[in-house]
Amino acid sequence: MLLHESLSKQISVSFYEVYNRLGYGFLEKVYQNALYFELKDRGFEVIAQRRCTVFYKGKEVGEYFSDITINGIIILELKACKKLNKKHELQLQNYLKASSIELGFLLNFGHKPEFRRIVFQTITTLKYIQNF
C-alpha cells in the first residue's frame, strides 16, 4: 500500500485534468493557480506558497516556499519545462528534508506531462522515487 494512496490518486487525476484542459505552454504560475483551484474544488485543504524554514543546529539558515501543500501532508513542486531532471528531484527532496512532510510530487506541465512521487521516511533517507 502506498503512503496516502487515495489522496495520491486524486492529485494525479487533478494534475491530468489541468494538463488536458490547459495543454502545454503556459508559465508555471498559471498551472499552479489552476491546480490550486482544482484541488480546492475537490475538497482538499490547499495552501499555495507555504513557507518552510530550514534550520542547521538549531539556527535558521534559510527558507523556501513550496508551490502547493495539500492537507498538510503532501508537497507539490510544479514545473513547466521541457523535461524533468535530477536537479528538480533534489529540489523537492530538500523541501521534504526541511519539513515534517514525507510525501511529495514533482509535476511537470511540459510538452509531455510528467508526474513523479518522492517519499521520505526520515530526514536523511530517500525511500523511493516513482515515475508515472
Image (cartoon, rainbow, N blue to C red):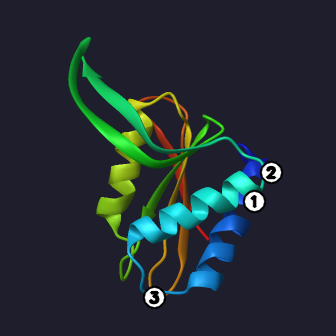
**Residue where numbered disc 1 is placed:** 9
Residue type for callout 1: Lys
Determine whether the residue tagged by mark 2 lies in a helix, strand or loop.
helix
Amino acid found under the numbered disc labelled 2: Ser
Residue topped by disc 2: 6
| Helix, strand or loop status at disc 1 | helix
Q: Are marks 3 and 1 in contact (CB under 8 Å)?
A: no
Q: Which mark is residue 111?
A: 3
Mark 3 or 2, nearer chain start? 2
Corner quadrant of residue 38: bottom right
Binning the other alpha carbons within 10 Å of mark 1 as few (below 14), some (14 to 19) or many (20 upward) gives few
Q: Amino acid at mark 3?
A: His
User: Eyeballing the image, is 9 above or below 112?
Assistant: above
Q: Are dots 2 and 1 in contact, CB under 8 Å?
A: yes
Neighbours of disc 2 within 10 Å: few (<14), some (14-19), many (20+): few
Mark 3, other Cα within 10 Å: few <14 / some 14–19 / many ≥20: few
From this viewpoint, is residue 46 visible? yes
Residue displayed at 43% across by 29% down: 123
Give the CA separation, mark 3 to mark 2. 27 Å
**Residue 101: horizontal and vertical position, in percent?**
53, 34
**Which quadrant would the C terminus be assigned to in this image?**
bottom right
Q: Position of residue 70 (x, y in %)?
A: 62, 44
Question: Image point 26% across, 11% down: which residue?
Answer: 58
